[in-house]
Image (cartoon, rainbow, N blue to C red):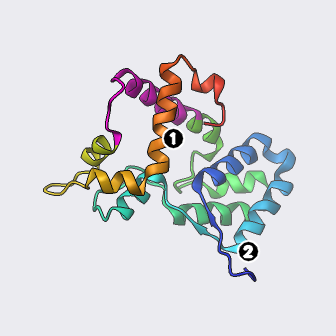
Amino acid sequence: MRSGANFTIAPPALIELTRGLIKSGAAHFDSDKMVFAWLHEQNFGILPLPYPFMTKVLGSSITPRGRVEPQHYRELISMVSGAADFADFIKKTADTVWQDVSRADQIHSDELDKEIAALGSLAKLGRDHNYARRLSQKLEIPGCRPNPLILARRFSAALEFLESSIVKIRSGSNPRKNYPGL
């Protein structure tokens, strides 16, 4: 960038673009492809998903749960920008981590349901839960547990978002209905 600013793409932004591409299918593929071609030209950095990101920040050697890494998002961008048409794009995804991309919306919805159910479970645990401590235990590797205070400082925004989401659920909110952007 001329101004010296650097841009980095968060995976959820690419997932939303991909879901839109899949939903519109062949009808708007050329327009959608232009967005991906522009992203391909820019070669922006791509953040890892939250869990691998957290383990990296904490210096943990825990293996990430998912199999999608930033490089895979670069491949997705390349596959879309290099495809002749929608059918060609779908064909290119075979034998890649994106082989189920045609079900992107359903996969996203299923994952969101799991996360919202987990929020509901946390909401039932009680009011005085130290989520930084619980997260520290979850990220523990044999003989080494991240300090909950460091975790609370480094991920304060995420923990605040978690806590505010739990408060909303405790007060009777239905996140799927009341907060569709969650």
Q: Residue 46: which quarter of the image?
A: bottom right
Query: Mark 1 or 2 closer to N-term?
Result: 2
Q: Residue at label 1? A: 161
86 relative to 16 in the view: left or right: right
- Residue 41: give its label: 2
Count of numbered marks: 2
What is the chief secondary structure element of the magenta stretch?
A: helix
Asked if 150 appears above or below 8 in the picture, the reply is: above
Image point (65%, 43%), residue name: 102
133 relative to 64 in the view: left or right: left
Asked if 96 appears above or below 121 in the picture, the reply is: below
Q: Where residue 164 sits: x, y (%)?
A: 51, 34
Q: Where residue 18 sits: x, y (%)?
A: 68, 50
Image point (15%, 54%), residue name: 142
**Front residue (pair 175, 151):** 151
Give the CA distance from mark 1 to mark 2: 34 Å
Q: Which residues fall within the magenta stretch?
A: 109-131
47 relative to 134 in the view: left or right: right
Amino acid of disc 1: Phe
**Location of the C terminus (image quadrant):** top right
Magenta highlight on residue 144: no
Q: Where residue 167 sits: x, y (%)?
A: 48, 27
